[in-house]
């Protein structure tokens, strides 16, 4: 799609996920993450550990964990 000289990438190019991961439904009891979003300025291992701990309250399904992970990032880390 072209708009004022800016080409918008296809949605498929804006994420690293397979159709299976994208199609995975979130757990019925999903309330959202309770951890702070990671911006790339602190230890990434600590963020991943906190993320996994938070997610295990809802699921151990790896597809769900992958699908939600981008929601735990912001700023430079998300870019």
Image: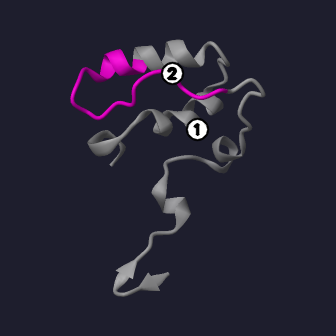
Is label 2 in a helix, a strand or a loop? loop
- Where residue 47 sits, quadrant-wise, is top left
Residue 67, label in figure: 1
Span of residues in magenta: 31-48
Residue 34, label in figure: 2
Q: Is residue 18 above or below residue 45?
A: below
Residue at horizontal 47 percent and vertical 57 percent from the top: 14
Left or right for 27, reference 48:
right
**Residues at discs 1 and 2 in contact (Cβ within 8 Å):** no
Who comes first in sequence, dot 1 or dot 2? 2
Left or right for 11, reference 46:
right
Left or right for 38, reference 21:
left
> Which SS does the magenta portion mostly show?
loop
Residue at horizontal 71 percent and vertical 46 percent from the top: 23
**Alpha carbons under labels 1 and 2: distance apart:** 16 Å
Taking depth in this image into account, of 33 and 56 the one nearest to the observer is 33
Is label 1 in a helix, a strand or a loop? helix
Question: Which residue is situated farthest in the bottom direction here?
Answer: 4
Residue at horizontal 33 percent and vertical 15 percent from the top: 46
* Residue 76 forms part of the magenta stretch: no
Q: Nearer the viewer, mark 1 or mark 2?
A: 2
- Where residue 32 sits, quadrant-wise, is top right
- Where residue 38 sits, quadrant-wise, is top left
Question: Which residue is situated farthest in the right direction here?
Answer: 28
């Amino acid at each position: 799609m072209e708009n004022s000289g800016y080409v918008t990438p296809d949605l498929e190019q804006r994420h690293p996920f397979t159709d299976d991961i994208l199609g995975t439904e979130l757990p019925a009891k999903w309330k959202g993450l309770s951890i702070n979003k990671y911006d790339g300025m602190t230890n990434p291992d600590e963020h991943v550990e906190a993320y996994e701990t938070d997610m295990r309250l809802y699921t151990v399904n790896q597809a769900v964990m992958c699908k939600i992970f981008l929601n735990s990032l912001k700023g430079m880390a998300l870019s």
